Image (tube, rainbow, N blue to C red):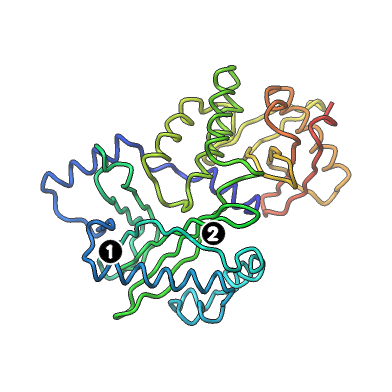
Amino acid sequence: MSLEDRELVLMRSHFSSVVRFFWVFTILLCGLPLVAQTCFTSDDMDTATRTAIQNAGTRFFDMVSRGDAASLKQNSIPSVANNFAGIENTLKDKQAEFAGVRATPQPPFMLKAEGTAPLERADFLCGIFNGPQAAKSAEFVIPNLPPGTYGVMMFDFQTQKAPYTLSLILQQMGTDWKLGGFFLHPNTLLGHDANWFLQKARDFKAKGQTHNAFLYFWQARDLSMPLSFMYTLATDKIFDEEQAVRPSDFPLDGSTVQITGADGKTYKLTAMFSVPVEQNLDLVVKYLTTDVSNTGQTFQENMNVMKAVLAKFPELRDAFDGVVTRAVEMSGRDYGSMLAMKDIK
């Protein structure tokens, strides 16, 4: 995942909580008019529909494991087939690693979006959100979704390098199910899974290092979400812990934070998040600048920001191996510098 993608994930709005799940579900049961989005869990579907979705998903996963991009493209909806380069490149990059892998499919979901125009924010509540069935339930929040019937098939599999979840979004076209979305999610980061990051976050919280805790809670939740638009009871619980230590002095959800460098200059921070760099976990800090063309000057400003951030949040030295500072113009052009934590004095 690129730095830009991780920033977007970090800054996205958080839609759900366990309480909101139950509240919305209760209202729906109380007789309000049916909304334009309907979700069916595996148990809700008739046998023929469930089997059709499972068979299509399994067939597409087999194409992935064989690196058969041509067949996968041929079985995609037009909008995916016409922009297939990303999927094709992924299959090429992972062909040796994925060859012959066996997957464990998760129970499918089916989403129905009604209407004649794309839904600005389609919100699908799937299952029962209290009691024993809550663990099997999920919420999907998808922007700009065209009307249609969709299947969600998720496959867990282990390669020699790492565990993954591949989520395939299927769309019903006539009597066929076509590929409508492809999301490959690694379930570990630097060899550590979500539970490892979750425990580290709790350890940081116990030591009063709430900034570290927040960043590690976020990383745990990110690893727990194979789809960035799918929310479960497990991810909501992590979100609740994350929000309990949410710092007011971090740039989050589009906000900015000002910090003063050793040069006396004020810098406007726009993002802070973690990212793997080779075998290290580094902290990325982005800030606004007017011009990055003078790279010598920008490098020095990057160093000033690094030192100022660590001076203000010294606990970050315990959680990260290095810092990546990126000066970003309003145009989006940027210039980055990276130092190992031990070298930042």
Residue 50 in percent (x, y) is at 28, 66
Q: Is residue 7 visible?
A: yes
Q: Which x, y percent locates residue 277?
A: 73, 46
In front here: 255 or 184? 184
Q: Earlier in the sequence, mark 1 or mark 2?
A: 1
Query: Secondary structure beneath disc 2?
Result: strand
Question: Compared to 322, does 91 lie above or below?
Answer: below
At 32% across and 47% down in the image, what residue appears? Answer: 136
Q: CA distance from mark 1 to mark 2?
A: 23 Å
Given residues 173 and 48, the one toward you in this image is 48
Q: What number of labels is visible? A: 2
Vertical order, 109 against 277 (above or below): below
Residue topped by disc 1: 112
- Image quadrant in which you'd find residue 339: top right
Q: Bin the neighbour count of mark 1 within 10 Å (Cα to Cα): few under 14, some 14-19, many 20 and up.
A: some
Asked whether 99 or 232 is in front, the reply is 99
Query: What amino acid is labelled 1 in the image?
Result: Lys
Q: Quadrant of residue 150?
A: bottom left
Q: Does the rendering let one see residue 39?
A: no
